[in-house]
Image (cartoon, rainbow, N blue to C red):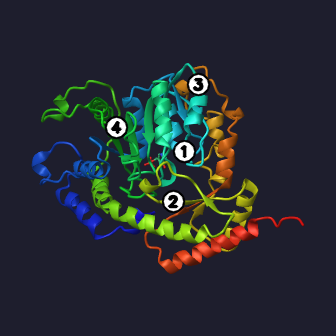
Amino acid sequence: MPGTELFGAEERKEVNDVMETGMLFRYGHDAQRNGHWKAKDFEAEVRKITGAKFAHAMSSGSTAIATALAASGIGAGDEVIVTPFTFIASVEAVLFIGAIPVFAEIDETLCLSAEGIEKAITPKTTGVCLVHMCGGNAEMDSIMAVIKKHNLILVEDAGQAFASSYKGTYTGLFGKAGSYSFDFFKIATAGEGGVLVTNDEETYKKADVYSDHGHNHVGEKRGMENHPFLGFNYRISELHAAVAVAQTRKVPGIKEKNRKNKKFMQDILSKNSKISFSKLGDESGDSATFLNILLPDTETAQRAVDEMNAAGVVGFDYWFKNMYHFINQWDHLKNLSTVSKLPAELFERSQDYNKLNLPKTQAVIGRLISFGVKYKWTESDMKTLADKISACVDKAVKPVNA
Ligand SMILES: *Cc1c(COP(=O)(O)O)cnc(C)c1O
């Protein structure tokens, strides 16, 4: 959690600007705000890092991905190809805008593969919700070829991949719209917050309206603004945006340090022949928030997890057993357990979520153990940790029967 590791005077200063005026609302009230526009400043910082033409700050990464889908024209009854390995928000977003998730296979990038997407296409497929997992980036050239060939709408959930890029283009900017999360666990945090990015002005305008009850934000009087579309309240507050401004300014430095620390760890770990690493679409664009090790098979990985727990190693995730990030534990999704009926329940679905067959995904996630890269790791911290990991992996590898 590098952002939270660096919480300090800069965040307090930005928050104090808001506290001194009491202007917690992001729109209007020009006379009272003493020139402070934290949501706008936050958006400008995000545009500066990513090169996005448009950035719209919102209440969370979840509301940003839902808005990205809706503003891209995806809605009730549309099939959207999704990944079985993600924070479940991406799948919930598809369901809650009325669309139907269809699961496809990932590869060793930990993201949907072009092949996986193509195999999951049906006549009802409208779009793809691509998630760039663990701070990395998907194999975009081959994915974009499939998107174009089948004329699909691409929306990217880059909730975990702010500041990650592929061949010079930042995640979130390959399709119609993309989203970043600034919750407590990401590279930078607002406390709670998210940002939608797009290079398409029309999509940006729709998102702006949709995320604020249809207000088009033209003119001086809020009550007299036009309401071109229905929307809802997905606004960010100035307090959250203030924290995010200070945090976002730290991201280039965080990324540089993350990348150094990750490389230091990988250089040690790669001496162990049983340890390999997840792939990246573009290694040079990695935001390096996670060090993702792949072991030879699921059984070895599970034994390595047991060994690491016994040895007191902390700061890792074994997603295969994690309640929120992998489909094997999503019983509520498989059974569509909801507090009230969703549109997806009214449409014919081309997949039975209880009978999904995703062998490639199962094999990759079974082998995967991810460590959160820490900004404040010292070289001696890293050496100790890497040596421990390596020793645990050695113990977990079954001795070859003579
Ligand atoms: C964190 C995350 C989200 C949700 O973001 P919130 O800000 O917590 O709503 C969505 N998608 C992915 C991939 C995430 O990791």
Q: CA distance from mark 3 to mark 2?
A: 36 Å
**Relative side of 388 to 288, left or right:** right
* Residue that badge 3 annotates: 345
Q: CA distance from mark 1 to mark 3?
A: 27 Å
Q: CA distance from mark 2 to mark 4?
A: 32 Å
Quarter of the picture holding the C terminus: bottom right
Q: Residue furthest bottom?
A: 380
Residue 294 location in percent, x, y?
A: 64, 57
* Residue that badge 2 annotates: 290
**1 or 4: tag closer to the N-terminus:** 1
Picture disc at residue 203? none
Circle 3: element type: helix
Q: Amino acid at mark 4?
A: Asn
Q: Residue furthest right?
A: 402
Residue mark closest to the camera, 3 vs 2: 2
Dot 1: few (<14), some (14–19), or many (≥20) neighbours within 10 Å?
A: many
Instruction: Tell me: residue 383, above or below residue 304.
Output: below
* Residue that badge 4 annotates: 233
Q: Amino acid at mark 1?
A: Cys
Residue 258 location in percent, x, y?
A: 44, 65
The answer to which image quadrant residue 34 occupies is bottom left
Q: CA distance from mark 3 to mark 4?
A: 25 Å
**Relative side of 367 to 232, left or right:** right
State the residue at coordinates (88%, 65%): 401
**Contact, mark 3 vs mark 2 (Cβ under 8 Å):** no
Quarter of the picture holding the N terminus: bottom left
Q: 275 or 16: which is nearer to us?
A: 275
Q: 150 or 331: which is nearer to us?
A: 150
Q: CA distance from mark 1 to mark 2?
A: 14 Å
Q: Amino acid at mark 3?
A: Glu
